[in-house]
Amino acid sequence: MAITLPAQTVTNLHNFDVTDGQFPFAGLVQAANGDLYGNTYSGGASPNNDGTIFKITPSGTLTTVYNFCELTNCTDGATPIGPLVQDSNGNLYGTSGYGGANGRGIVFKISAGGMLTTLYNFCNLAGCADGSQPYAGLVQASNGNLYGTTEFGGANSHGTVFEITPAGTLTTLYSFCALSGCADGVSPSAGLVQAGNGDFYGTTQDGGANHNNDCDAYGCGTVFKITPGGGLTTLHSFCAKTGCADGQTPVAGLVLASNGNFYGTTQLGGADNNNGTVFEITPTGNFKTLYNFCSQSGCTDGQGPIGGLIQATDGDLYGTTSAGGIGYGTIYKITPSGSLTTLHSFLNTDGSEPYGTLVQDTNGTFYGTTFIGGANGYGTVYSLSVGSGPFVETVPTSGKVGAAVKILGSSLTGATSVTFNGTAAVFTVVSSSEITTTVPSGATSGAVKVTTPHSMLSSNVPFVIP
């Protein structure tokens, strides 16, 4: 079931013009200073036009923080594709798909002010056994380390899962295509999500147990889980149904919802003309297709979702399609049971082909990017308001007793209380957008709440204490 509503309040905040970047592929991340950070695939001030990192205020003032390929031979990286992540110390971490000492991509750390440090150069081992082309973003786990994927390289040349410490020590946890027929998957293009049990969950866009003419030679993609020690289990191989009715080519990652299940998208497959799906999968692998795109005449409900989903404070899931609608892609929301509502169709003048995953700012507004389109044709940053109220967000979203935690929000000055699932914590108000605290003794998994002179703010996702 799909419902089309009149356009929601979508505001074009910035039109890229090449000098400040072009073609933003990834979504944004909200930092502790209240600004949003993102990157562009190319453009910028360097002569090679190899991409940028930028920050933008919620009202739309954009500043270029870093231009890639400023160093000889692009040893500082080039063409970032995945989103950034901020750790509990306030540093931003990311990847570039190319550049670095070996030309095969890097993991980097960058301060909010623009000081970039290369932590690791991929293809540092013979045969790129450590991985190559890290296109996805990273996730900070409960142990403080960062986890990610490379689309290529590894022992079998079909991608890896890796762990890297904040200081830059990298461990390859798994090399894909280790099983006959690449039944364990090929080419993970998206990042990981950590569940409360400590395991990580992700997707590969190719590989799996099902091979037919509709898919890549290696298969149609998988959903997998992997332990922190590297033990991998394939939970679902796509194209398990006739005509790939369950979807194929999941290029986006997963989101862990409040009901304990994971939700994701496939770019292709589905029951309606191979235009992609939204699916639900349990931690044990029970799989369900929730929605088939292009189920409306003229694909007014969208087609080809490349970006992933987020769960908003209203409990619904929000995402984008790269095409369809009444123009050049859509923004939609879908309930956990599968009822989809089209919120906005892009018309090119306001952006086109939204590839990145949305982010909900702690002010309640959604922010995103379009890869192309806008006033100059090189992509945009936009906001979407659906009337949601403010909340707080924790960085990270899990940690043991005593772990340092940042709480992001709006109008936090004068806060009088911070609790972890009802257990009071000692805290410091750093600014109107940031509180620092530690997980208190006796705390259990659940919502983090902040009491301010104006309201009671609750975290958008439960804080998990392993």
Image (cartoon, rainbow, N blue to C red):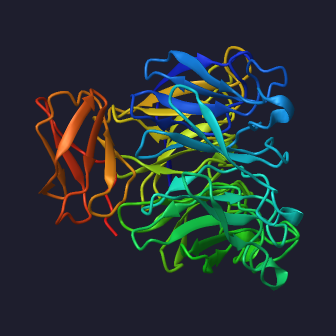
Query: Is residue 345 visible to the viewer in this orientation of the structure?
Result: no
From the viewer's perspective, is residue 240 above or below residue 302? below
The percent position of residue 239, horizontal first and vertical second, equals 72, 73
What residue lies at 43% left-to-right and 39% top-to-bottom? 90
Residue farthest toward the bottom in the current orientation of the protein: 180
Is residue 374 in view?
yes
Q: Nearer the viewer, residue 406 or 455?
A: 406
* For residue 428, side relative to residue 297 (left or right): left
Quick check: 43 left or right of 90? right
**Residue 284, percent from left and from top:** 50, 80
* 273 in relation to 432, above or below: below
Q: Is residue 57 left or right of residue 188?
A: left
Q: Quadrant of residue 24?
A: top right
Q: Position of residue 225 (x, y in %)?
A: 57, 73
Task: Kindly indicate the quadrant of the structure image that contains residue 355.
Answer: top right
Q: Quadrant of the C terminus?
A: bottom left
Q: Residue at x 69, y 73 (%)?
A: 174
Kindly indicate the quadrant of the structure image that contains residue 180.
Answer: bottom right
